[in-house]
Amino acid sequence: MEKKFYLFIFAEPLETEQLRLKYSKHLEQIKIDFENNFQNLYELNWNNKQILLAHCGVGKTNSALMLSYLLTKFNILKVINIGPAISIFNGSVGDIYCIQNCKYYDVNLTALPNYKIGQLPSLQDVFHCNQDLKICSNFKKANIITGDSFINKSIINSDILDWNTNNLLGDMECCSLAHTSFIFGKPFYSFKVISDCLESNNNLEYRQSKAIWELKIIDIFKDILGEL
């Protein structure tokens, strides 16, 4: 019988250093068909559950490439993205959010009739994340914008403001992962931990910030494992 997996996908190996250390006795690295130092895959054997833990790499293309590869190679039941994100308006380092909706902020075809920011031909401008895990009710909800550059105040234009109805976060992978999951017809979930705050003076150094959000990633991962 073909194995059926739950896929946890992260951007970078540095995001899971402590998580992989915690579960090291249960992790086995799986060889993939392309070799680099930023995309890799592990299988986690935990309480008779088949879990894949993947690092897709930073950016829209890397994340879509890796997820597309995994969805064609393995029978994936759910795609679950966990990782750090920047808070654009509210929030503090370490705050956890369950993502409701995501869109690309660096896609603009509005010179053509009836297009919205973030919309590609024959696609919607907003991709929705699944909310049917019980853990989703434990956290505040947020929308997220995704693009291939670090977010600064210059990209927060009226189109983004009009779209956002709640807390707004930013990253470089989430919408691409949601987009790919949508194309493959797979349930997609995303949980983000604030690592930076655009609107506030964040006096934490990177190492201090990482020490906070990386432990929160472990907490989210552990709670989801308990629910699957």
Image (cartoon, rainbow, N blue to C red):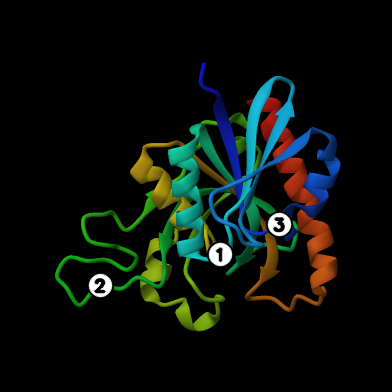
Instruction: Indicate the position of residue 4 as horizontal and vertical percent values.
Output: 54, 25
Q: Can residue 99 be seen in this view?
A: yes
Q: Which mark is residue 109?
A: 2
Question: What distance separates the C-alpha of mark 3 from that of mark 2?
Answer: 34 Å
SS at mark 1 in the image: strand
* Residue positioned 26% across, 54% down in the render: 123
Mark 3 near mark 2, Cβ–Cβ under 8 Å? no
Q: Nearest the camera: 142 or 72? A: 72
On the image, numbered disc 1 is attached to which residue? Answer: 171
Q: Nearer the viewer, residue 151 or 81?
A: 81
Q: Which residue is drawn at 85% across and 67% down?
A: 208
Residue 48 % position (x, y)? 70, 19
Residues tagged 1 and 2 counted as in contact (Cβ below 8 A):
no
**7 left or right, relative to 67:** right
Q: Return the disc, 1 or 2, that comes first in the chain's sequence.
A: 2
Which secondary structure lies at badge 2?
Answer: loop
How many labels, in total? 3
Q: Residue at x 37, y 40 (%)?
A: 184
Rendered image: mark on residue 13 = 3
Residue 131 is marked as: none
172 shown above or below 198: above
**Could you say whether the residue bearing mark 3 is in a helix, strand or loop?**
helix
Q: Earlier in the sequence, mark 1 or mark 3?
A: 3
